[in-house]
Amino acid sequence: MKKVLLIEDDTVVRENTAELLELANYTVITADNGKTGVSKAKKYLPDIIICDIMMPELNGYGVLQILSKEKSTKQIPFIFLSAKIEHEDVRKGMDLGADDYITKPFDESEIFSAIESRLAKVAIFKENRDKQKIENTTEIDLHENEIKTIDQLKSYFSENVEEFIFQPNEIIYNEGDNSNYVYLINTGVVKTYKIDEQGKELITSINKENDFFGFTSFTHNINYKESASAIEVVTAFRLTKNELQQMLDKNHLLTLELIDYLSDNVSEIKEHLLEMAYSSVRKKTASTILQFSKKIKKSPTDNPKISRSDLASIAGIATETFIRTLSDFKKEGIIEVEGRNIKIINFDKLKKIN
């Protein structure tokens, strides 16, 4: 029988709705507030969730936001059940990813129709996905299981490798840890960095969506030579280094592609180090803003969001000096600074700074 998680703080509504569902041969799990509902969703992994909006502890919007970020629960159909019928309330629920919205009072045919249609949609999706997997597997078999390009490797990560979530400033790995994994960023931004003997942080790279990080030697068991942490909320796929090495052993064209990929990264790092060594403070600051903006922009309207100390670390200059230079750029009409946000007003002028 299909499992339904019913999250509702009104005892009468909860018990009556649960009884209706049980009579229709659903297994019903109930929760009397949002916090308990989240816990039970993760524990029981129901086939569908029906959730009230206005509840103690955690409201329905919060429940959906939390569960939509969890790998084990984000695909579960979610139906809001509420007396709130204003257009903006319905729109908010749908924008957050709800599958349907039922208003109180409701009749049993309405709720059964919503449940059955959502379960049918999931079943069709799963059937098509399984069919696609079979077709993909057949295609791979025809090509002797070869993954020939970096793009194919990234597709393998996204389809076959477990995804992890890291919160802002959360450490992904520390310098000196065993280098057991290679990562591919799905969403968010990650910095890698080293700490010198005086405790000063030097950022070695900024990695965005669709970037790899965490590479070390494939032939020697060495530790990570730098640390990595999330700048914003990050989702990333993590593959063991041994598994990747086995893939490279079987797919020689991929090995060559990966060598080219890593060589390009090394070239970028060398250029950055030369700029840090020989450029003026103004040039370093301008280049850092442009580099970061280019690295993490998801659309033309996005602007960099990063702490001043991180930007200074990328530039290789003192935070106080960096902030003073930002103030100069602001006075010159090149940028605007609003809290943590830097908005570039004049790209051409910023590029020409020496």
Image: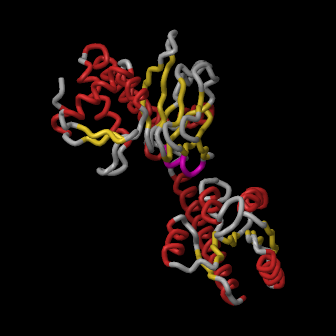
Residue 25 seen in this snapshot: no
Quarter of the image that includes the C terminus: top left
Q: Which is nearer the eye, 162 or 143?
A: 162
* Position of residue 182 measured from the top left corner of the image (x, y, whole percent): 56, 34
Give the main secondary structure of the magenta stretch.
helix
Query: On the picture, is 208 further left or further right than 332?
Result: right
In the depicted structure, whether residue 20 falls above or below residue 294: below
Determine if the magenta segment contains residue 230.
Answer: no
Q: Is residue 177 left or right of residue 268?
A: right
Answer with left or right where residue 35 lies relative to residue 133: right
Identify the residue shown where x is 43% and y is 40%. 208
First to last magenta residue range:
154-160
* Corner quadrant of residue 314: top left
Between residue 323 and residue 29, name the one nearer to us: 323
How many marks do you count on the picture? 0
Tell me if residue 107 comes above or below residue 335 in the rendering.
below
User: Residue placed at 50% from the left, 19% from the top?
Assistant: 194
Residue at left 58%, top 69%? 98
Residue at image point 43% right, 28% down: 310
Residue 44 is left or right of residue 336, and the answer is: right
Q: Position of residue 287 (x, y in %)?
A: 27, 29
Above or below — where is 231 with respect to 15?
above
Query: In which quadrant of the rendered view does residue 13 lie?
Result: bottom right
Coloration of the structure image: secondary structure
Q: Nearer the viewer, residue 184 or 207?
A: 207
Residue 217: image location, x then y, percent: 54, 22
Asked if the stretch drawn in magenta spans residue 159, the answer is: yes
Does any portion of residue 158 appear in the rendered image?
Answer: yes
Q: Residue furthest top?
A: 197
Q: Which quadrant does the N terminus fall into? A: bottom right
Q: Could you tell me residue 146's position as x and y percent?
A: 51, 44
